[in-house]
Amino acid sequence: MIREREWNTSPLIITVAPTGAEVTRVDNPAVPYTPAEIAEETIAACSAGASVVHLHVREADGGPSAKTELFSDAIARIRTGCGAITMVSTGGAVGMSIDQRAAGLAGAPEMAGIEVGSLNYGEELFATKPSETRALARQASAEGIALEIEAFDVSHVEAACRFRDDGVLPNPLRFNLVVGVPGGLAASVRNLIALVSAVPTDAPWTATAIGKQQRRILATSMLLGATGVRVGFEDSVYIGKGKLARSNAELVAQARDLALTLGRTVAEPQQARELLGLETVPTAPAPAGQSVAYVLDGRHPGDA
Ligand code: KMH
Ligand code: ZN
């Protein structure tokens, strides 16, 4: 939801999506493939201001992979080098089965992305049935993994709210609002506002934009009160018009500089955990008579 009366003064969470499933070294020779390369890129991105990493893994030839051991390896390496929140994709790549898409859930991440609907993805159908969302959500919950909803359409934001009301998705809902996928919503301010307007007031939201409007959409999101923005080779291999980025860290540094220019600060990983409601265990006992529900649903005492 857009907070009309105040700027968001919280630190901005920058998520890095270092490799994705579609771009290759033909697009940009710096795209990381191996767990060691993915971890190295993530750790450098973390030094540049990222506090969350959205992970896909690759086969040695760069093709998208569904191997749990590659997720585990990347996550273990990332944890030795930085405090970033590790989030696995369960979107995987177009054409993967739902079991393949679930591979990262067994890799001990802190978070997972989850799809709650379908869309065309270029020339392909990127399909997620309600039964598949339920199965992924059940599995994530059994592993104690927090979720981020990957919303490519207003109908996905609405579906997530219905899943929450039905007890399929836990509170707090956290959204990644994605524009610019060919087949999804175009990367326009109008579409961004339509998505943000559908997000419940208390839900954190991140913006992801694909294509040449990326920076304008991310800047608009920062001003609209986004909890976070996402950058990385998964979303763009360019640092500017026709200019390839040398690394994910360079893309993160650009987002960080934009945030600072617009008057936002940038979250450290621990601040990001708090903003995303990831700390579900109270650090001190609740005062007598006060429910700890605020901790479980990500709100804080005093919130309206
Ligand atoms: N590779 C896309 C088909 C996600 O990570 O959840 C799906 C995707 C979204 O990247
Ligand atoms: Zn992804």
Image (cartoon, rainbow, N blue to C red):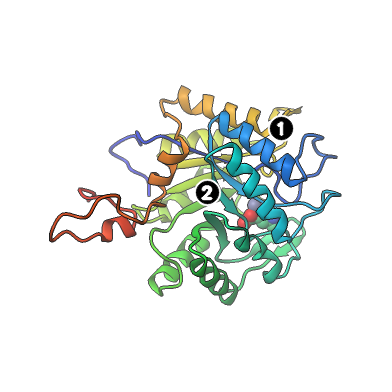
Which x, y percent locates residue 91?
A: 65, 60
Q: Answer with left or right where residue 206 lies relative to residue 29.
A: left
Considering only vertical position in the picture, is 4 above or below 167?
Answer: above
Q: Nearer the viewer, residue 34 or 153?
A: 34
Q: Answer with left or right where residue 124 lies relative to residue 190.
A: right
Considering every residue shown, the one lying at the far bottom of the view is 131
Q: Is mark 1 within 8 Å of ligand 2?
A: no
Q: Answer with left or right where residue 270 lies relative to residue 211.
A: left
Rendering quarter of residue 183: bottom right
Which x, y percent locates residue 9?
A: 34, 33
**Three-letter code, disc 1:** Tyr
Residue at 70% x, 48% y is 20
Neighbor class of circle 1 (other Cα within 10 Å; few <14, some 14-19, many 20+) is many
Q: Which residue is mark 2?
A: 191
Q: Element type at marker 1?
A: strand
Q: Nearer the viewer, mark 2 or mark 1?
A: 1
Q: Which residue is mark 1?
A: 238
Q: Element type at marker 2?
A: helix
Is residue 298 shown to the viewer in this render? yes
Residue at 75% x, 62% y is 124
Label ID, residue 252: none
Is residue 226 shown to the viewer in this render? no
Which x, y percent locates residue 235?
A: 66, 43
CA gap between label 2 and label 1 equals 23 Å
Rendering quarter of residue 227: top left
